[in-house]
Image (spheres, rainbow, N blue to C red):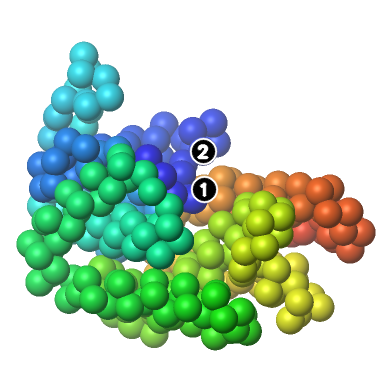
């Protein structure tokens, strides 16, 4: 269970909780049946969150046994549902992107490698549905890694991932009529998540002398925090424009009550750890914008 866009259980209504569980458990079941039991441990929360952008289609729920708690049954969407299929496709791509990124970085984990190879083994079955080849995934991660090693400007470093994410959104969310909005949403999603991960690793990367997206952005833009703030609001506007009315409340709750507050905390921690006075002065304003957006 990985990813940046998890649900905030304390802030959701009972209906939102049921809707999210039907998607989450449906994805878990589909991964187990399509790839194997171990695949459930590589479930990416972002895949559930992004599937909410697909059109709403009512479907009869089915009762299945829970892998984590075998003593109880849960209600979930069947694997034939379009939301579950899109979730499986995106989950597979996210796992493989992380796998190839770790390979390039030299990271070794036999558990991650074992699970990733399960997804690789079944990728040919999924590929005709997605029209995204393994070579395309490998090439994207290689270009990004190469740009990081050469310390290219921020826009050039982030470009391969943003382009790939735009294509992924276009293929996996193909039911959307406005392809321009979908591609733009994919681009901003990739940039936001890359910056979020970079901000988490900022201090450690500085100590180890590694390239960092956030460090590059700070060097190139005087108003880096304002740039991130604009990305957060752009993604919210595009997501709500695409998201069907039936999913909008759940989508907004996950985004504004879980992901954005954690971004706020990263900013606060960054200001404290680096003694960035500008960040300290702007943190209260950033927090105020966040609270107004929730209302």
Report the side of 233 relative to 136 (left or right).
right
Instruction: Report which residue position mark 1 lands on.
Output: 253
Q: Residues within 10 Å of mark 1 (few under 14, many from 20)?
A: some
Q: Who's the residue at 20% across and 18% down the image?
A: 70
Q: Is residue 59 visible?
A: no
Q: Is residue 183 left or right of residue 190?
A: left
Q: Residue 52 got which mark?
A: none
Q: Position of residue 126 (x, y in %)?
A: 13, 63
* Residue 130 at x, y percent in the picture: 18, 71
Dot 1 falls on a residue whose secondary structure is helix
Of mark 2 and mark 1, the one earlier in the sequence is 2
- Residue 96 vs 111, above or below: the answer is below
Front residue of 23 and 41: 41
Question: Residue 276, position in %: x, y?
Answer: 87, 59
User: Which of the image's four quarters has the N terminus?
Assistant: top left
Kindly report the distance in space between the C-alpha atoms of the residues bearing marks 2 and 1.
8 Å
Residue hosting label 2: 8
Q: How many neighbours does mark 2 have within 10 angstroms: few (below 14), some (14-19), or many (20 or more)?
A: some
Location of residue 40 with respect to 280 vertically, above or below: above
């Amino acid at each position: 269970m990985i990813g940046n866009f998890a649900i905030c259980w304390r802030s959701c209504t009972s209906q939102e909780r049921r809707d999210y569980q039907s998607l989450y458990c449906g994805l878990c079941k589909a991964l187990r049946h399509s790839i194997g039991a171990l695949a459930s441990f590589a479930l990416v929360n972002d895949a559930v969150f992004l599937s909410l952008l697909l059109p709403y289609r009512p479907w009869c729920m089915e009762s299945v046994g829970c892998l984590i708690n075998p003593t109880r049954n849960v209600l979930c969407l069947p694997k034939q549902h379009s939301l579950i299929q899109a979730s499986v496709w995106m989950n597979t791509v996210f796992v493989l992107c992380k796998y190839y990124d770790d390979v390039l970085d030299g990271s070794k984990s036999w558990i991650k490698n074992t699970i990733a190879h399960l997804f690789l083994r079944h990728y040919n079955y999924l590929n005709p549905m997605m029209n995204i080849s393994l070579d395309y995934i490998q090439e994207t991660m290689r270009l990004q890694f190469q740009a990081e090693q050469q310390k290219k400007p921020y826009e050039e470093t982030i470009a391969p991932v943003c382009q790939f994410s735009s294509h992924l959104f276009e293929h996996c969310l193909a039911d959307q009529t406005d392809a321009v909005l979908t591609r733009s949403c994919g681009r901003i999603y990739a940039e936001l998540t890359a910056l979020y991960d970079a901000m988490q690793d900022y201090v450690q990367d500085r100590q180890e002398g590694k390239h960092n997206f956030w460090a590059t952005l700070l060097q190139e833009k005087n108003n880096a925090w304002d740039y991130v703030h604009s990305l957060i609001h752009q993604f919210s506007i595009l997501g709500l424009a695409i998201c069907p009315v039936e999913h909008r409340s759940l989508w907004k709750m996950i985004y504004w009550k879980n992901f954005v507050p954690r971004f706020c905390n990263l900013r606060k921690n960054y200001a404290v750890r680096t003694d960035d006075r500008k960040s300290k002065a702007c943190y209260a304003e950033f927090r105020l914008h966040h609270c107004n957006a929730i209302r």
